[in-house]
Each structure stands twice: as C-alpha cells, then as structure tokens.
C-alpha cells in the first residue's frame, strides 16, 4: 500500500480490534516524525476495544457518524466497518474531497505492514545517524530490515491463501443454497456459460446439471434449435428491445418489480409428455462498477393454472439488484440468498436457533433480522403442531422434508400458511437446516370456505332429522304443560310426586333439545386447520346425534364396533365429524339405491375402529365404514374423490362431499381407501398416524 501519512489528520470509522492496533501504532514514539494526528474514532458500539484504546490516548470518540463532518482539517478517513447509516456521511465526505480508504482484511494488513515498516525505517535511520557503524553493523541492520520485510510478505501470502480458501467455501455454500431452493433456477456468466442448474430445474426439464453446466447449451431443454434464453438476452443488454422482440414477440415484458429484469411466458412442447407452460424471469448480476457479469433466471410451471383459469398469476418473486460488491463468492451468495422469491431461514440443526434470514422473511413476516436471530425457529411455528420439532431434529445430512400447510406467525400476530421445504446441509462449517417457505394462505382460506360450504350443504340434508330430534322433547314438554294446565283449571290438586316427575321430564327434555341445538351450532361454525389430540371414536359417536332419526327413517341398522383405549390422533374434531357424516350419508344413499334397483335390501351399516400396523411398522388408527348398497365399478372408484363427480341424480348431490373429505384426511397425514364391487356394497377405510 502506497500512502503518505505525513502531517495527515485522520478519523477512524469502527472501534474494533484493528482500530486499537492502528491507534497504538500511529501514537507510538517510533512514528512521531510523521506528525500524524488522530482527530476522532466514530462507532455507535462504545464497548469495543478500539474505543477504549482511543479514550486511553485522549483521542475524541463519538457514537454519531455525522460528527465526522464537523471536523476541521480532516483529510483522511480509515473505514473499518460497514453500516447502512454510513451512506450519507460517506457521500458528504466524498463531496468535500476527503480521502476515504475502505480497509478490508487485505488492505488492513497492508496498512499494518506500512506502519511497521515506517517504524522500522525510523529505528534503523536513527541508529545509523547516531552511531559510527562498521560494515558488519550495517549488514546486520540491512539483514534485520530485510527479514522484517520478508515476514510482512509472508503474512500477506498467508492472508491471501486464507481468503482463497474462504472463497472456495463460500462458493460451495452458494451452490448448496441454490440447490436447496424449491424454485427452478439457473445462472449464466457474461460469456453465456451455464454455471448453476439446480435440482428443481432438473425435475422440471428432465435434464441433469452434469449435461449442461460448463456449456452454453442452456437452450437445449426448451428448444429444438439453438436460440438465446431470456438470461442470454439480459447478459447482452436488455435495452435492445428489437432483439428481444425478434425472439419472444409479444410473450415478454419488463418486470414491474425488478429493475432491468425481463419476464416472459411461453409454451414448450418438448417439456413433459404433453408440453408445459413456463413463466420465467431473468435479472442481471452486476459487478460493483455496474457492468453485467452474468444473469439469473427462474422458472415456474404454470400449466395447471393455464388449464384451470386460462390465466396465470404473476410470479411472486423478487430479485433485487445486486448492489453490493461482486468480487467475492460470499457477496454473490448473499445477493442470491436475499433476493430469492421465497422466505429462507438458516437454522442450527441441533438447537433450531435461527442463524440467518433473507430479506423476503422481513417483508412477508414483518420481523427484522434482529428480532429473529438467536431465537428458535419453533417460535414462529404453530405451537400446537408437535410434529415439527422432532421431524427437524431427525433430519440426517443431505435429507429433506416438506411440511404442507403449516401455520406460521407474523410479527403483527397474524397467521399465514406456508409449504416449507427443509434441507439438512452445512453452512460456515456447521450443520444447519435451510428452510424455504412458500405462502399459500390464500389457497388455504379458499379451501376453508369450501369446507364450510360443504358443512352447510350437509346441514341442509340433516334438517329433517334435526327437526325430529328437537320436536320429540318439545312434545314431552307440551304434554306435561297441558296436563298441569287442565288440572289447575279443574281445581284438582296435583300430587307432589307427579309434579316432581313432570318437572324432571321437562328439565330432561329441555337439556336434550339444548344439546342437539348446541351440537348443530358447533358443527356449523367455521373450523380451523388445527392439530389437536383426540380419540377417533368421539367424532364418530357425535355423527349419530344429528343423523339418528335419518337412519331410522331409512330403516338402516347400525352396527358399531368401536375399540376402546385407542391411540390418539392429531386432527380437528369438527372436520373429522364432517368426514364421517359424509361417509354415513353416502352409505344411506347407496343402500336406498340398491333397494330401488333390487327390491328388498337388508340395510346394514357397520362402523369399526381399531389400531393397526402400517407397511413400515408404524402405528395407525383405522376406521371402516361399510354398507350393503349398490357398490362401485372400477371407473367410479377411480373418480370418486374428484371435485364435482357424483353418481346421484341431478339436484341431489354437489359432488364435493368425498372430495372435501379426501382433502381433510390428507391434511392430517391420513389416507382413505375403498373396497367395493358392483352390487356388493362398499367399505371406506380411513387411517391416521397414531400419537405416542
């Protein structure tokens, strides 16, 4: 480092350990000839070693960076730390033509070497001038000085080796983060050579990374002939709209979110069996001087959205401009990490402590980085979901897990639902979990509305049964009241025992009617997707509180074989009751249909529960709902869980009951299977994991 320190007035930004070393050396007697003056050390953190050293040397210190602008005669600033609050101060210093040196690890070592060398030169010069030295003494002094210079060179070499190793580690971590992303992503450099092609890209296109990385063949999965990808267009400069128009026509546009990014949507017949619609976004990667040194492109399969609604939602992603220096792989990793479209958490695999988050977490969850770092990842998860912690701690190296429809907590206290993909990997030489979350709150809310609509439709079919259940106790109350009124009018005294008996009958039947009304009200309320421990027999028994009369009217004999002391399961009582009400009402309809087709039919419904062992030795709780109805053909069984599919007459079924039931069972990690033959009835088998 070439730096003239003679008579300089210096301010230091950052009171860390290097600051203490610089202060000590510049104020040492050996460099007094330079006439250097340290006029201030600025750092908001007042407990740092450099601040203490400055105070010991009677050097002014400040916790406000803006105080630097008030210093008279200041002509050199040594910057030892990065802080967003420094931006306006550094701009003002530059406008005042004050030299600012940003001391990274290498420059700091160079400055340290410069100061040591100057001190050594002063010492050698002083000895030569103060003594009569012989040739051997001069040689000795020269050897000592040369050795000193050689030692400094060795230190610089070791630092460069260390930084090179750090760069290699950072490059490895960058690759792991990109590979762990659920978003198909690839990166090219400014020579159009593919450098990254993650697993999600492999799954989407069917082309492996080893086939493409290191080549300029990123077009191969999408085209039958060579043609620039959108990332290639970004690398050569997105200002050439005519060139982009030439290849993409009206299918492209400039991103409204990401500066200088391009977006496009196109159908690729070569992807998959029948082709796929892909929405893709490409953004430039820039060096500190603003030159484009590469591009990142993300892909989203929107085929299903295209088929369902003939339109697609704009990709919810943000690739902020790479505003930090791009000289080191750590900076490249940080830019890609922070600008990933999904919130990403870096979590300690043993303690589940949050080690790092990207900017997307702050935007979607409302927390600042300071709010989350050092806290447990479980703090933002649903405290009622006891499966998250053991699942995370049970992940081995390289393993991954997907948590579907998990509830997370925002800083405001609101909840959001996310699909979370978690991968076990290494980060900064420690075992970590990389958790990438996708917000599906809107989808879950619509699903909840659909389930609620299914409940209301079910209540409509149960109206007659509920009326009967309420009417019976009302009749008893009416009879008792009429009897008491007649006897009073006739002046006949009612014996005390009879009066007590009638009062007890009234109380008992009021309780019965109230119980029916309460149960219907509880069933009709909108339920949340909660995970609570419960006995599967409870929602099954509650079904007959509202369907008992309906079973009697349809002459259905019910055989219950509910095992006692079953393992509990994790589910929500209200939603499971909806599942079993749907299965019971479908069984009644199937037996009615069998009766119409074949005359007499013994209508028997059997419901059994028991504990079973799964194919992998896991404990399961099983419920079987069997009927003697018309049964199902293989074609009907294959479509039975599809939305709006029904075998009932027009106006007698929406086709949503079994579809909603299938979704509810799946939400609680359960399965639902069917055993049926035409004319031989049907058995629906529902299984859930048992809770230890």
Image (spheres, rainbow, N blue to C red):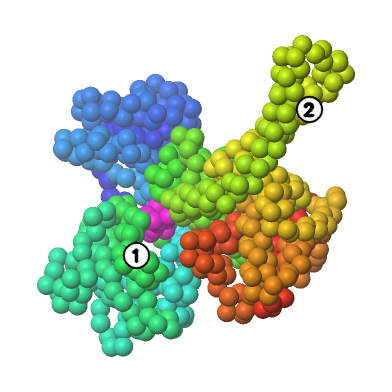
Residue 633 lies, in percent from the top left, at: 62, 79
The residue sitting at 40% across, 29% down in the picture is 44
The residue sitting at 40% across, 52% down in the picture is 338
Q: Classify 10 Å Cα crowding around label 1: few (below 14), some (14-19), many (20 and above).
A: few
Corner quadrant of residue 42: top left
- Label placed on residue 505: 2
Disc 1: which residue: 309
Q: Is residue 203 shown above or below 395?
A: below
- SS label for mark 2: helix
Corner quadrant of residue 311: bottom left
With 584 as the anchor, is 125 left or right in this view?
left
* Along the line of sight, the residue nearer the viewer: 407 or 109: 407
- Magenta span contains residue 336: yes
Disc 2 vs disc 1: Cβ atoms closer than 8 Å? Answer: no
The mark that comes first in sequence, 2 or 1, is: 1
Residue stretch rendered in magenta on the structure = 332-343
């Amino acid at each position: 480092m070439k730096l003239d320190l003679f008579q300089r007035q210096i301010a230091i930004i950052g009171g860390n350990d290097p600051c203490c070393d610089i202060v000590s050396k510049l104020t040492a007697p050996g460099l007094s000839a330079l006439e250097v003056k340290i006029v201030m050390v600025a750092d908001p953190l007042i407990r740092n070693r450099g601040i203490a050293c400055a105070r010991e040397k009677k050097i002014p210190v400040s916790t406000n960076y803006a105080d630097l602008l008030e210093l008279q005669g200041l002509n050199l600033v040594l910057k030892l730390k990065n802080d967003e609050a420094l931006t306006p101060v550094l701009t003002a210093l530059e406008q005042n033509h004050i030299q600012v040196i940003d001391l990274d690890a290498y420059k700091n070592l160079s400055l340290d070497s410069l100061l040591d060398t100057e001190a050594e030169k002063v010492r050698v010069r002083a000895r030569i001038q103060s003594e009569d030295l012989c040739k051997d003494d001069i040689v000795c002094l020269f050897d000592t000085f040369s050795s000193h210079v050689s030692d400094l060179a060795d230190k610089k070499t070791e630092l460069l080796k260390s930084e090179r190793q750090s760069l290699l580690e950072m490059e490895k971590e960058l690759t792991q983060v990109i590979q762990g992303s659920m978003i198909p992503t690839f990166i090219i450099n400014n020579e159009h050579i593919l450098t990254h092609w993650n697993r999600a890209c492999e799954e989407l296109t069917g082309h492996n990374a080893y086939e493409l990385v290191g080549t300029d063949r990123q077009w191969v999965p999408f085209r039958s002939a060579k043609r620039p990808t959108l990332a290639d267009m970004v690398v050569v400069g997105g200002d050439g709209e005519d060139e982009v128009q030439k290849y993409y026509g009206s299918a492209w546009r400039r991103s409204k979110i990401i500066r200088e990014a391009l977006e496009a949507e196109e159908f690729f017949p070569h992807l998959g069996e029948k082709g796929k619609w892909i929405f893709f976004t490409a953004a430039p990667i820039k060096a500190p001087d603003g030159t484009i040194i590469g591009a990142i492109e993300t892909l989203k399969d929107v085929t299903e959205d295209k088929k369902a609604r003939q339109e697609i939602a704009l990709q919810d992603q943000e690739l902020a401009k790479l505003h930090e220096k791009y000289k080191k792989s750590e900076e490249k990793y940080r830019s890609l990490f922070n600008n990933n479209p999904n919130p990403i958490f870096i979590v300690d695999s043993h303690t589940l402590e949050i080690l790092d988050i990207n900017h997307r977490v702050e935007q979607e969850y409302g927390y600042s980085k300071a709010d989350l770092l050092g806290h447990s990842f479980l703090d933002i998860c649903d405290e009622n979901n006891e499966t998250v912690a053991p699942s995370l701690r049970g992940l081995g190296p390289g393993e991954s897990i997907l948590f579907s429809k998990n509830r997370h907590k925002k800083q405001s206290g609101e909840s959001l639902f996310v699909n979370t993909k978690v991968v076990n990997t290494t980060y900064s030489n420690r075992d970590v979990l990389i958790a990438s979350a996708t917000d599906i709150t809107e989808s879950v809310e619509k699903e909840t509305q659909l389930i609620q609509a299914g409940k209301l439709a079910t209540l409509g079919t149960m109206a007659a049964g509920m009326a009967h259940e309420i009417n019976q106790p009302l009749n008893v109350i009416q009879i008792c009241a009429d009897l008491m009124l007649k006897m009073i009018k006739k002046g006949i005294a009612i014996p005390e025992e009879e009066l007590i008996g009638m009062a007890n009958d009234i109380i008992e039947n009021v309780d019965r009617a109230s119980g029916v009304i309460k149960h219907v009200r509880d069933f009709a309320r909108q339920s949340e997707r909660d995970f609570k421990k419960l006995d599967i027999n409870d929602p099954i028994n509650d079904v007959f509180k509202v369907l008992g009369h309906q079973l009697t009217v349809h002459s259905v004999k019910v055989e219950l074989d509910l095992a006692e002391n079953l393992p509990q399961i994790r589910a929500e009582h209200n939603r499971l009751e909806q599942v079993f009400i749907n299965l019971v009402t479908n069984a009644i309809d199937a037996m009615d249909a069998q009766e119409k087709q074949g005359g007499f039919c013994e209508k028997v419904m059997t419901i059994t529960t028991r504990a079973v062992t799964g194919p992998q030795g896991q404990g399961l709780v099983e419920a079987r709902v069997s009927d003697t109805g018309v049964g199902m053909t293989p074609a009907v069984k294959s479509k039975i869980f599809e939305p709006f599919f029904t075998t009932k007459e027009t106006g007698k079924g929406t086709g949503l009951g079994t579809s909603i039931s299938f979704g509810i069972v799946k939400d609680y990690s359960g399965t639902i299977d069917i055993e049926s033959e035409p004319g031989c009835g049907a058995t629906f088998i529902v299984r859930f994991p048992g809770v230890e």
